[in-house]
Image: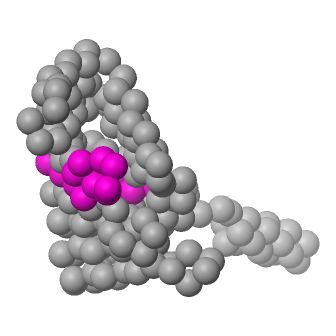
Amino acid sequence: MRIWLLLMLLVALGATWWASRPEPAATAQETADEEQIQDYFVHDLDLHLFDPEGSLSHVLNAEHLTHFRVSGIALLKQPRYTLYEEKRPGWKIRADKGELSGDQSRLLLLGKTSIDWQGDERHPAMHLLTSGLTIHPQEEYAETEAPVTVTSGENWIESTGMQAWLKAPGKIRFLAQTRAHYVAQ
């Protein structure tokens, strides 16, 4: 009888141990698959952001947005970003595709990226062409390490890399290998 009781106790302990053992860790493939799970998508995105005074400050449009649950990243197709200055569109930025961070603090524009500024009474309009542009909307700051071409009338600047502070009065710093052509008025 003692042997049967001892065997039953050992079987019970073995079953308890087997049932309570930890699950095997997820494989790298399973983790990667979870990160690629889309939780929603939007066609014809039209997002308007307002400043604390209630004035329109930013508009983000896209042909298609796909949001990923785990990372919080949103992929954009044909994004268009407009930064408003004094209630009028100041900077208009378009790209082939983009990636918006989960906290919306970084907008990465990929492929051909076009930036237009309409100018004001003191400064002429300008057009910038680049790729791989990173925008920080809260800071109204943009940067790239890619080649940049700026045109304004007959004037042009070519550079590798750029930092741009978009908020008025605005400032652009060209980082390397800069060439320019200026026509005096």
The residue shown at (25%, 58%) is 118
On the rendered structure, is 138 left or right of 98? right
Residue 153: x %, y % from top left:
11, 42
Judging depth in this view, the residue of 87 and 185 nearest the camera is 185
Would residue 97 be visible to someone looking at this image?
no
Q: Is residue 51 above or below residue 33?
A: below
Q: Quadrant of residue 147?
A: top left
**Quick one: 39 or 48, which is closer to the camera?**
48
Instruction: Classify 122 as above or below 158.
Output: below
| Residue 164: x %, y % from top left | 40, 41
Magenta span contains residue 1: no
Which residue sits furthest left? 154
Residue 128: percent from the left, percent from the top? 21, 44
Q: Residue extending furthest top?
A: 177
Q: Name the residue nearer the viewer: 122 or 119.
A: 122
**Quadrant location of the N terminus?**
bottom right
The image quadrant of residue 97 is bottom left
Task: Work out whether residue 77 can be spotted.
Answer: yes
- Residue occupying image coordinates x 20% and y 18%: 179
Between 166 and 95, the one nearer to me in the picture: 166
110 falls in the magenta region:
yes
Residue placed furthest toward the front: 185
Identify the residue at image location x=31%, y=57%. 120
Q: How many marks?
A: 0
Residue 116 lies in quadrant? bottom left
In this rendering, the answer to whether 131 lies above or below 8 is: above
Quadrant holding the C terminus = top left
User: Is the image coloured rainbow, by chain, by secondary structure, or in one colour?
Assistant: one colour
Q: Residue at x 33, y 69 (%)?
A: 89
The residue stretch that appears in magenta: 106-125
Residue 177: percent from the left, percent from the top? Answer: 25, 15
